[in-house]
């Protein structure tokens, strides 16, 4: 039988994809969950879905609309949530947007929006919750980065910038928060079948598509399981999926040599096929 966890969990980006799947899984293990995202309708549907997966009717499943990129909105909503539900034992920062395109197509506004959501969003929520988590005596923060937070890829100047930032922030927080009994995990999945991928496909160059295939494709439930396991074992860096693990291993042991060369080859071949070279 799956082990129960019985904690209060706050999940940003909880209305869809990885956040929603993790909420379902944690609810099935006995956790109460509070979901955050911008869209009210998506949150309502997600709440009903998570409730249906809860192990017992006494568990709380609630939601609050919040834009993680807007610091004043985050402070207001997090205060409201903590007053109403209490400080979380676990915070999962899954809110994020994807963006793949040639660097010269990325306007300042697009850059700003992704940085605000992916980087400032993570910073804003942790900053607003930290005092109450410390007061509670500890907890666990899980930040969702990406394989793109560990390897730079064609067409990912902006997305990689945001996801490398999450890895760096998490690495530093792990060290700083240890003394407050707050564990930190950073999760670096490869491509995962969610709404995010559909959005990203609208601008993704063919070269990026070809390179991305090297890291493998996962279902949200694979990532949710990896997150729950990491929480139980208090693991720091989690790379879900065998292909992604192998890719990062090659990248690290060869200082990039064994991943840049094949990636350059794939890029040249794809560009040649597309008549770009
Ligand atoms: N899917 C992949 O291939 C993949 C791979 C590696 C890492 N990741 C990372 O995994 C995380 C989750 O992505 P996903 O694939 O689950 O995407 P998704 O299905 O599109 O879900 C994204 C969630 O974030 C919320 N969100 C977006 N902008 C927000 C904002 N400004 N404030 C609050 N909530 C916001 C969305 O709801 P609203 O739009 O209603 O706000 C939604 O609930 C992201 O950080 C992403 O970078 C994804």
Image (spheres, grey):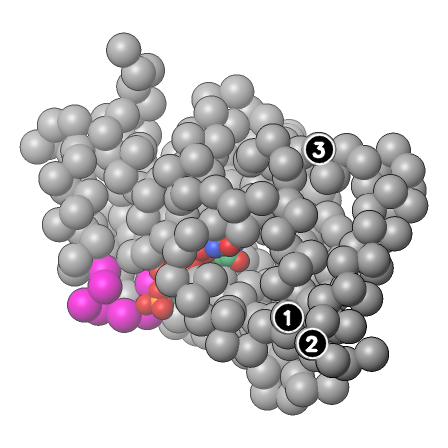
Labels 2 and 1: the sequence-earlier one: 1
Find disc 1 in the rendering and name its residue: 206
Find disc 3 in the rendering and name its residue: 246
Find ligand 1 in the image and state its quadrant: bottom left
Find disc 2 in the rendering and name its residue: 274
Residue mark closest to the camera, 2 vs 1: 2
Q: Is residue 269 left or right of residue 147?
A: right
Q: Residue at x 33, y 56 (%)?
A: 16
Q: Is residue 57 left or right of residue 207?
A: left
Q: Is residue 133 above or below residue 148?
A: above
Whether ligand 1 has any atom under 8 Å from the Cβ at mark 1 is answered as no
Q: Residue furthest left?
A: 57
Residue mark closest to the camera, 2 vs 3: 2
Mark 2 in CB contact with mark 1 (< 8 angstroms):
yes
Look at the image and tell me whether residue 172 can be seen.
Answer: yes
| Local SS, label 2 | loop
**Real-space Cα distance between discs 2 and 3?**
29 Å
Badge 1: residue crowd in 10 Å (few <14, some 14–19, many ≥20): some
């Amino acid at each position: 039988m799956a082990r129960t966890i019985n904690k209060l969990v706050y999940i940003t980006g909880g209305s869809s994809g990885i956040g929603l799947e993790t909420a379902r899984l944690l609810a099935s293990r006995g956790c109460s969950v509070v979901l955050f995202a911008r869209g009210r309708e998506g949150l309502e549907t997600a709440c009903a879905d998570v409730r249906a997966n809860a192990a017992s009717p006494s568990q709380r499943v609630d939601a609050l609309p919040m834009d993680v990129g807007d610091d004043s909105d985050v402070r207001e909503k997090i205060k409201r949530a903590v007053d109403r539900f209490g400080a979380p034992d676990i915070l999962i920062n899954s809110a994020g947007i994807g963006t793949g395109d040639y660097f010269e197509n990325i306007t300042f506004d697009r850059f700003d929006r992704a940085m605000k959501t992916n980087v400032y969003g993570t910073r804003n929520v942790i900053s607003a919750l930290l005092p109450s988590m410390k007061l509670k005596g500890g907890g666990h923060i899980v930040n969702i980065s990406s394989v793109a937070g560990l390897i730079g890829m064609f067409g990912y100047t902006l997305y990689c910038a945001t996801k490398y930032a999450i890895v760096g922030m998490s690495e530093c927080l792990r060290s700083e928060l240890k003394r407050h009994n707050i564990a930190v995990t950073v999760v670096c999945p490869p491509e995962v079948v969610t709404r995010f991928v559909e959005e990203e496909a609208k601008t993704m160059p063919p070269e990026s598509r070809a390179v991305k295939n090297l890291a493998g494709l996962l279902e949200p439930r694979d990532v949710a399981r990896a997150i729950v396991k990491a929480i139980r074992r208090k693991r720091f860096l989690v790379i879900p999926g065998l292909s992604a693990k192998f890719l990062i291993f090659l990248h690290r042991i060869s200082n990039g040599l064994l991943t840049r060369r094949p990636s350059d080859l794939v890029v040249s071949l794809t560009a040649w096929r597309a008549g770009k070279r």
